[in-house]
């Protein structure tokens, strides 16, 4: 196995630690929202009625009318995809995706985790009514993955979590590309060209170092409207906007400016010097990290659970369960998530290490990587998202949703079993979660 030295690994970035804490904690909210949706849909008949209630935004003679479910899926979820864009930008600039060898292992693992599940799903559904829904089986839910890993994973360094996070980032890119390319039926070329023109305007503003958040927000909202009108899913707006936000390490000149402003404030505390010190402090942190700090909690604790609440409710009666038990859609998703992710991610990682194209931290062992590959079969948020795009028939949606829930539960159980059998063995992990270093030989004091 290719390894890295301690110097090459370095410590986890502050942003990465914050992301891990937020995503792991939000898994509880997400699972709770799914349970509430299932209970609501099976106990009360108001579930579908509520989420299909229409809500309109009007400005003069113009109006944008959607039901509540689509406002969540097409509106609020853009903020979720914006946070994904921020995450990708940050990881490629400051995090685990810097450099060709650093990105190769998680990228090839993610590529295997995208292609093998899709192939297994199509083996069940090729030529059938669910053939176009192969995108359901390819996605990994980062929040639930990290949450389950915290419960069932080995007591190992955070490098395992970071490897899986990097894998999930590349997986998100593939899933979003699939949504944009394969799940767009009709394109309004005029609206799309206007949206592209607005995107070029944003790039031009960034190129000339014009940073005024209200201007970017206004252009982004207008671009979202035209992308929605074009027929392309507006998730691409969130991702592209997030990718454009700068991520950089604190600059020495900014730290010196902060030091001077702080000393000046201590010598003579005035409102003007307080504002100058505050501006200097803000300038030491990149816009990417500042936005992540503000948006990530809303995305993880409010928007994604609300999305699950709006999409996970299905009636689990005998007829629905019997239809799912014999449905190639359900079985294709289950096999794709459970077997496809395990095989694809493991094979991609093995290829990267075998050929020397990639590396992983030397604290990781194959049992842990295979356990993580199994857990990557937990597909939830984006899988439900693709389900809504791929099917109009409610019966097929129910079969797909059952496949997502069953496949995700089985993937979590399989990962737990692999960690119990292989993950701890030879893992060089102490109860505190830190690598065990060999004891130094005792020498008498000189």
Image (tube, rainbow, N blue to C red):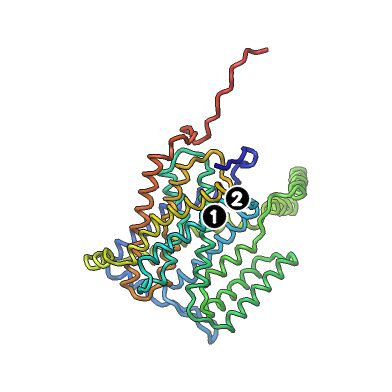
Question: Is residue 131 found left or right of 98 in the rendered image?
Answer: left
Residue to which mark 1 is pinned: 108
Looking at the rendered structure, the secondary structure element under dot 1 is helix
Looking at the rendered structure, the secondary structure element under dot 2 is loop
Residue 180 in the image, given as x and y percentages of width and height: 52, 71
Residue at 36%, 57% (x, y): give it.
407
Does any portion of residue 42 appear in the rendered image? Answer: no
Using the image, tell me which numbered label, if any, was put on residue 357: 2
The residue most toward the front is 355
> In terms of image quadrants, where is residue 203?
bottom right
Asked if the residues shown at circle 2 and circle 1 are in contact, with their CB atoms under 8 angstroms apart, the answer is yes
264 w.r.t. 294: above or below: above
The answer to which of marks 2 and 1 sits earlier in the sequence is 1
Residue at 40%, 47% (x, y): give it.
415
Question: Is residue 134 found left or right of 363 in the rendered image?
Answer: left
Disc 2 packing (10 Å; few <14; some 14–19; many ≥20): some
Residue 77 in the image, given as x and y percentages of width and height: 49, 66
Residue 2 in the image, given as x and y percentages of width and height: 57, 42
Residue at 38%, 50% (x, y): give it.
412
Residue at 54%, 43% (x, y): give it.
159
218 vs 402, nearest the viewer: 402
């Amino acid at each position: 196995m290719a390894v890295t030295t301690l110097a090459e690994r370095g410590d986890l970035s502050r942003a990465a630690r914050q992301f891990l804490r937020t995503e792991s904690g939000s898994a509880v909210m997400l699972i709770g929202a799914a349970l509430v949706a299932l209970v609501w849909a099976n106990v009360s008949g108001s579930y579908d009625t509520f989420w299909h209630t229409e809500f309109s935004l009007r400005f003069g003679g113009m109006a944008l009318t959607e039901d509540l479910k689509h406002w969540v899926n097409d509106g609020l979820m853009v903020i979720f995809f914006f946070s994904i864009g921020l995450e990708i930008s940050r990881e490629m600039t400051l995090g685990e995706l810097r450099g060709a060898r650093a990105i190769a292992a998680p990228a090839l693992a993610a590529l295997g985790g995208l292609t093998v599940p899709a192939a297994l799903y199509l083996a069940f559904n090729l030529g059938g009514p669910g053939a176009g829904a192969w995108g359901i089986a390819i996605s990994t839910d980062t929040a639930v993955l990290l949450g389950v890993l915290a419960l069932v994973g080995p007591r190992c360094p955070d490098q395992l979590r970071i490897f899986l996070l990097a894998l999930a980032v590349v997986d998100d890119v593939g899933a979003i590309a699939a949504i944009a390319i394969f799940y767009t039926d009709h394109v309004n070329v005029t609206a799309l060209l206007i949206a592209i023109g607005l995107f070029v305007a944003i790039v031009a503003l960034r190129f000339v170092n014009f940073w005024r958040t209200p201007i970017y927000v206004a252009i982004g909202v207008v671009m979202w409207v035209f992308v929605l009108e074009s027929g392309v899913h507006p998730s691409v707006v969130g991702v592209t906007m997030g990718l454009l936000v700068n991520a950089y390490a604190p600059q020495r000149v900014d730290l010196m400016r902060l030091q001077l402003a702080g000393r000046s404030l201590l010598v003579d505390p005035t409102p003007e010097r307080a504002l100058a010190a505050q501006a200097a402090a803000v300038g030491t942190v990149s816009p990417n990290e500042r936005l992540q700090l503000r948006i990530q909690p809303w995305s993880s604790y409010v928007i994604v659970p609300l999305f699950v609440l709006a999409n996970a409710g299905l009636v689990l009666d005998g007829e629905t369960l019997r239809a799912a038990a014999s449905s190639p859609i359900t079985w294709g998703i289950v096999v794709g998530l459970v077997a496809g992710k395990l095989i694809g991610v493991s094979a991609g990682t093995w290829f990267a290490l075998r050929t020397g194209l990639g590396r992983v931290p030397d604290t990781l062992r194959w049992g842990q990587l295979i356990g993580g590959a199994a857990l990557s079969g937990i597909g939830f948020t984006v899988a439900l998202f693709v389900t809504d795009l791929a099917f109009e028939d409610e019966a097929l949606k129910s079969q797909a949703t059952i496949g997502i829930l069953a496949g995700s539960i089985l993937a979590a159980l399989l990962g737990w079993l692999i960690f119990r059998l292989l993950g701890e063995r030879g893992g060089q992990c102490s109860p505190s979660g830190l690598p065990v270093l060999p004891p130094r030989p005792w020498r008498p004091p000189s």
